[in-house]
Amino acid sequence: MSSLAEAKSESITLVQVTPTLRLNVVQDPSSGIAYQLWPSATILANYLSTSNIVKGKAVLELGSGCGLVGLSAAAFGARSVILTDRPDALEHTQRNAAANVTESVACEPLAWGGGLPSELQKSFDLVLLSDCTYWQHLHERLLETLEEAVDEDTVVLLAHQWRRREVEQGFFDALSERGWGWKVVRECDADDVIVVEMRKRGGGEKQETRTEEDERAALLDRLRLLEADLESIEAER
Ligand SMILES: C[S@@+](CC[C@H](N)C(=O)[O-])C[C@H]1O[C@@H](n2cnc3c(N)ncnc32)[C@H](O)[C@@H]1O
């Protein structure tokens, strides 16, 4: 067993984010939700490669868990990436950062709703979060933290897996009520995951209507995903 996987139930998996990017993911599902990789993370990480929004950007990730999303952002050329999670889960995030290239990556403790520590009181171009919208009782705290972390120019990319739609829809309703503009930029039917692009603004209009251009981009993204899957299957033959 590698020294990176010292605990008995820990394992390291090589995850194919894109045809050209593979990252090590240390997991220990028996230790809790932060210790395993969720489908949303792989989908959001892959999405970062298809848009030109990461290169040179200052990136903050919330609820990083294994950190695949933020670590992918670093691999795709982000200027700086801060991975965050609850203080008790951060060691696992740090372990994942150490299992990959860590230049430009830092890890900081951050529990939602408790205010931003001074290390995080700076301007971020991009805030990322995957599978952090499942618990209704945390929606308010998560929104508070998001609102502290963004300014008008910050783009937020959030991946959400639908599990209890009637409950989780409340998060998106709250977004609109609190003045966020948002739209779905990728849908992955197989895992029931959506990637949502959000910005905080004064108006607060809900932006669910997708333009023809959005539809075309979503179709192209799906094609790329299929191509990536095919290449992975070919590579494993
Ligand atoms: C379902 S996991 C998703 C992990 C990772 N983003 C992924 O998609 O693989 C939810 C993450 O949110 C974190 N989290 C839960 N409650 C939190 C809170 N109150 N403050 C900060 N992070 C929290 C968990 O520790 C965990 O890492």
Image: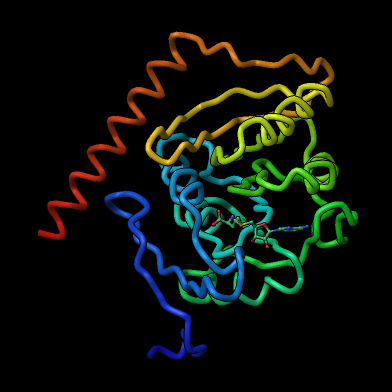
Give x and y (percent) for residue 206. Answer: 70, 16
Q: From where the camera sits, is residue 14 visible?
A: yes
Give x and y (percent) for residue 39. Answer: 46, 50
Give whichever of 141, 98 is nearer the camera: 141
How many numbered badges does the structure rendering display?
A: 0
Name the residue rendered at 49%, 72% in the picture: 27
Give x and y (percent) for residue 108. Answer: 73, 67
Give whichever of 180, 81 is nearer the camera: 180
Q: From what the image shows, is residue 35 above or below residue 111?
A: below
- Figure quadrant of the C terminus: bottom left
Q: Quadrant of residue 236?
A: bottom left
Q: Residue placed farthest to the left in the image?
A: 237
Name the residue rendered at 49%, 44% in the picture: 44
Q: Is residue 47 left or right of residue 138?
A: left
Q: From what the image shows, is residue 211 above or below residue 173?
A: above
Give whichever of 181, 136 is nearer the camera: 136
Name the residue rendered at 75%, 14% in the picture: 205
Give x and y (percent) for residue 227. Answer: 22, 38
Q: Is residue 72 left or right of residue 79?
A: left
Q: From where the camera sits, is residue 159 visible?
A: no
Name the residue rendered at 62%, 56% in the picture: 80
- Figure quadrant of the N terminus: bottom left
The way the protein has been coloured in the rendering is rainbow
Q: Is residue 111 left or right of residue 126?
A: right
Q: Is residue 146 left or right of residue 29?
A: right
Q: Quadrant of residue 235?
A: bottom left
Q: From what the image shows, is residue 154 above or below residue 88?
A: above
**Ligand 1 picture quarter:** bottom right
Q: From what the image shows, is residue 113 above or below residue 223?
A: below
